Image: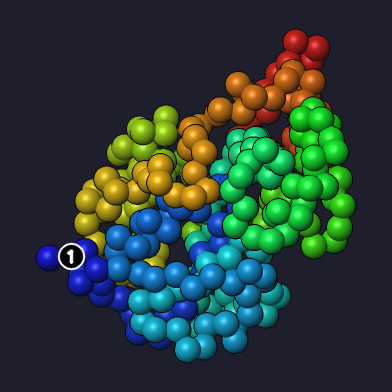
């Protein structure tokens, strides 16, 4: 029997998955897919109107914090709204984002990625990394994942949002723990009030190197990529974000 036939949940529920870019979105999408769910992408902050017309097994997915309207509906707690927030160590996100937007990367899912790669080609790798660390944006609409971490705290700290860490979902193939992965998968469907899910079976199918956005999928790989000076700069500018999301800043040689 296919896993997708086992879905049993509450009718009328509304599910939103917010996954910041380069936080392993393909992992949690695989989790939902293996359970028989189908995602509908929203390339902006979603509104309650975006839920209209969704089928029973469909959910919204976005890399943006939802509108104030959606946040207030979550606070009201009376519209069967479920929000899952997927995130990752901001330093690993930074490095993955750097490689994803690097001018030499042939992959470009969106037209604005191709556009910005032409702009970024005028900078050295060190300059480009510093631009991303400093959130030195070239235009208002430019997506910067570190900026998104700040704006997404409104989800992370709300008790009705389920927080899912990349490090807990990746499993041993990405440097994590398989039992923690299974528990995380189970927690997702407990939160979504979905019955008949074999968390262990689904967890075994999560890791997917074939995803178009996949690079390495390893925990803590930023330590092999960032210089001591870049780590120090990141700590100075975003040490609060590192700690608020439950991670610890690295100490460089010139730090006490």
- Residue drawn at x 29%, y 49% is 205
Task: Name the secondary structure under disc 1.
Answer: loop
> Residue 251, position in %: x, y?
70, 18
> Residue 21, position in %: x, y?
61, 52
- Residue drawn at x 21%, y 64% is 3
Say which quarter of the image contains residue 252.
Answer: top right
Name the residue furthest bottom.
Answer: 53
Quarter of the figure that contains the N terminus: bottom left
In the picture, measured across the screen, residue 97 lies left or right of residue 160, that is: right
Nearer-the-camera pick, 178 or 122: 122
Nearer-the-camera pick, 180 or 106: 106
Nearer-the-camera pick, 122 or 210: 122
Residue 253 makes an appearance in the image: yes
> Residue 26, position in %: x, y?
46, 53
Name the residue furthest left.
Answer: 1
Q: Residues within 10 Å of mark 1 (few under 14, many from 20)?
A: few
Nearer-the-camera pick, 101 or 50: 101
- Residue drawn at x 52%, y 48% is 213
Quarter of the figure that contains the C terminus: top right
Name the colouring of the figure: rainbow
- Residue drawn at x 39%, y 71% is 38
Above or below: residue 86 compared with residue 248: below
Residue 75 makes an appearance in the image: no
Above or below: residue 156 compared with residue 101: below
In the picture, measured across the screen, residue 25 lies left or right of residue 6, that is: right
Q: Which residue is mark 1?
A: 2
> Residue 127, position in %: x, y?
83, 32
């Amino acid at each position: 029997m296919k896993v997708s036939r086992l879905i049993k949940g509450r009718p009328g529920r509304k599910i939103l998955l917010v996954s910041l870019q380069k936080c392993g979105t393909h992992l949690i999408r695989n989790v939902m897919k293996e359970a028989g769910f189908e995602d509908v992408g929203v390339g902006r902050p979603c509104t309650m109107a975006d839920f209209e017309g969704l089928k029973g097994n469909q959910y919204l997915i976005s890399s943006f914090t939802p509108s104030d309207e959606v946040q207030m509906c979550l606070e009201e707690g009376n519209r069967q709204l479920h929000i899952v927030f997927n995130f990752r160590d901001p330093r690993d996100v930074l490095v993955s984002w750097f490689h994803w937007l690097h001018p030499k990367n042939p992959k470009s899912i969106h037209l604005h990625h191709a556009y910005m790669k032409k702009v970024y080609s005028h900078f050295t790798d060190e300059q480009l990394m510093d631009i991303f660390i400093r959130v030195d944006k070239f235009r208002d609409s430019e997506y910067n994942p570190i900026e998104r971490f700040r704006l997404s705290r409104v989800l992370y700290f709300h008790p009705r949002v389920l927080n899912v860490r990349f490090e807990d979902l990746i499993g041993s193939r990405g440097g994590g723990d398989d039992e923690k992965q299974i528990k995380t998968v189970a927690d997702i469907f407990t939160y979504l009030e979905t019955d008949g899910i074999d968390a262990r079976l689904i967890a075994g199918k999560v890791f997917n190197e074939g995803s178009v956005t996949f690079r390495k999928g390893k925990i803590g790989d930023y330590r092999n990529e960032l210089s001591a000076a870049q780590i120090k700069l990141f700590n100075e500018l975003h040490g609060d974000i590192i700690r608020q999301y439950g991670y610890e800043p690295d100490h460089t040689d010139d730090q006490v």
